[in-house]
Amino acid sequence: MEIKILFFAKLRETFNTGEIEITLTGSNKKVSDLIVALRQKGGIWATELQNNKSFRVAVNQEMVTDDVQLSESDEVAFFPPVTGG
């Protein structure tokens, strides 16, 4: 299953890309599985997507939790929490 992933703000700068595509395999295809697959890339990916790091995830422009099931051609966006004033 192909998933399009977008990165915003600090994550875009850290990963040096705004967009990638990844193939998820196996029976479980949740947001949490996608995060694990990205962590397995190692290096900065594992560091920035650790459990203790703060980031948000949206699927098809809707904020979600990591137990949401993904479907073919979903667009998943990762971004750090935003503060304003």
Image (cartoon, helix red, strand yellow):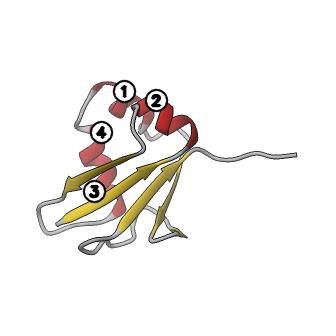
Q: Give the residue at the far top of this rendering.
A: 43
Q: Is residue 5 above or below residue 39?
A: below
Numbered disc 2: secondary structure:
helix
Picture quadrant where residue 32 is located: bottom left
Nearest to the eye among marks 2 and 4: give it: 2
- Give the residue type that dot 1 points to: Ile
Image marks 1 and 4: residues in contact by CB distance under 8 Å = no
Residue 27 is situated, as x and y percent measured from the top left of the image, at 14, 69
Using a 10 Å C-alpha cutoff, classify the residue at mark 4 as few (fewer than 14 neighbours), some (14 to 19) or many (20 or more).
some
Nearest to the eye among marks 3 and 1: give it: 1
> In which quadrant will I find the N terminus?
bottom left
Residue 52 is situated, as x and y percent measured from the top left of the image, at 50, 37
Q: Give the residue at the far left of this rendering.
A: 26
If you read the primary sequence from the N terminus, does the residue marked by circle 3 or circle 4 appear first?
3
Image marks 2 and 4: residues in contact by CB distance under 8 Å = no
Image marks 3 and 2: residues in contact by CB distance under 8 Å = no
Residue 85 is situated, as x and y percent measured from the top left of the image, at 88, 46
CA–CA distance in space, label 2 to label 4: 14 Å
Using a 10 Å C-alpha cutoff, classify the residue at mark 2 as few (fewer than 14 neighbours), some (14 to 19) or many (20 or more).
some
Q: Which mark is residue 33?
A: 3
- Give the residue type that dot 3 points to: Asp
Numbered disc 3: secondary structure:
helix
Residue placed under numbered mark 1 in the picture: 44
If you read the primary sequence from the N terminus, does the residue marked by circle 1 or circle 4 appear first?
4
